[in-house]
Image (tube, rainbow, N blue to C red):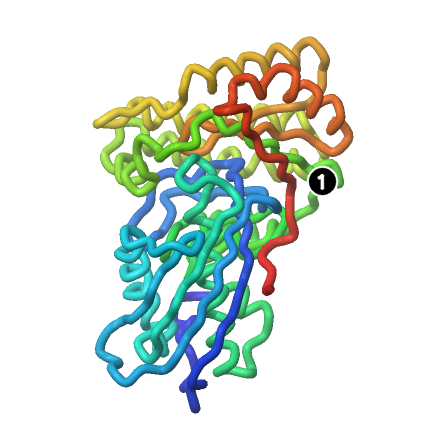
Amino acid sequence: MIQKDFLPNQYTDLPEEGKVTWKAPSNIALVKYWGKRKNQIPANPSISFTLDACATTTKVIYSKKKDVSQFSFDLLLDGKPKEDFKPKIEVFFERILDYLPFLKSYHFKIETSNSFPHSSGIASSASGMAALSLCLMDIERQLDAGMDQDLFNRKASFLARLGSGSACRSIEGGIIQWGGHSGVSGSSDLFGIQYPYEVNAVFKNFHDTILLVHKGEKQVSSTVGHDLMHNHPYAENRFKQAYANLDKLKTVFSEGNLEGFIEIVESEALTLHAMMMTSMPYFILMKPETLEIINKIWSFRKETKVPICFTLDAGANVHVLYPESVKEKAIQFIQNELVAHCENGHYICDRIGSGAKKL
């Protein structure tokens, strides 16, 4: 599908008012997207696990208005007005107006809440923009009764990407790829797709325990971080590495190769942070506790042969990944050795989920 495929049919009668609620999960990238081109196009493809417990719930209440010259909306986070979020929503609406031309016909009341701390290295923008996009798509589906589920999901992913790149990976469940790659059938820079190749059962019940090392605002936003890839001295080799790792994962997933999976996922996490440390300006997003956790995971894995590993987003928190078969051993290790490094001992037990849901 190309961009013009997401332009809508002619609308007939717009409803006077209504409300819709969606819950969209976060996701954790295994092969990282870092760096983007114009119009939210990724500089390299990425692949992720869709999560379950870490999610955003968004309700959109809409009512027709007379002045259709500009956007009109109120935004509440956890029941309180969030004025500093509004410019991002305004930009998002501008980007998607051609694809949802009813946006200026309504006043929207957007009520949103997260099941996890905002701006702490868990992808709240991903789940948030996914949930909002699904609400808006639900309104459009009322205006276009002929829309099938595949188009609904693709367009929701396409729109979510224009709000936050990784949000396009938070529509459907399981393993999601975003970014065109000749080695992956149906892949696109415009939207995420469910991974189309064989995946061994061991990867279908993976767990992700998120260790909240630091729950405050990140030192640098993801938007700024992506921009630092322009003219980065190591950018081109990094992009090539991502393509190569996606090629390797095809065999890893089909064979259930946990050792190969761990090698790729941990390398990707450290590469992401290496790119930030070698940019200009440069940033260290890990905390001392992050490194303590990583070293303890390495030691535990070496001593016990338990296939537990880590990945990181652009922050200090650690995502501890492990298959269902070692859940009890992994949780015991996390509670005994790793939770002490979390802020106030806080962590979140999550796992691969089934994607967004209408409430």
Between 310 and 348, the residue placed more toward the observer is: 348
* Above/below status of 55 relative to 327: below
Picture quadrant where residue 34 is located: top left
Q: Is residue 333 above or below residue 75?
A: above
Residue 45 occupies which quadrant of the picture? top left
Residue drawn where x is 62% and y is 30% of the image: 321
Numbered label tally: 1
Return the residue nearer the eye: 337 or 234.
337
**Three-letter code for the amino acid on which mark 1 is drawn:** Asn
Which residue is at a point 55% across and 57% down the rendered structure image? 23
Q: Residue at x 34, y 39 (%)?
A: 222
Q: Is residue 332 left or right of residue 317?
A: right
**Residue 163: % across, % down:** 37, 56
Q: Return the residue at label 1.
A: 205
Using the image as rendered, state which of residue 8 and residue 256 is in the foreground. Answer: 8
Q: Is residue 114 above or below residue 351?
A: below
Question: SS class of the residue under badge 1?
Answer: loop
Residue 135: x and y in percent read 48, 67
Badge 1 local density, few (<14 within 10 Å), some, or many (20+)? some
Residue 350 in the image, given as x and y percentages of width and height: 62, 38
Q: In the orientation shown, which residue stands out farthest toward the front?
A: 80
> Is residue 5 visible from the viewing direction of this image?
no
Q: Quadrant of the C terminus?
A: bottom right
Image position of 129 with respect to 100: above or below: above
Residue 197 visible to an observer of this rendering: yes
Q: Residue 54: horizontal and vertical position, in percent? A: 55, 44
**What residue is drawn where x is 36% and y is 25%?**
285
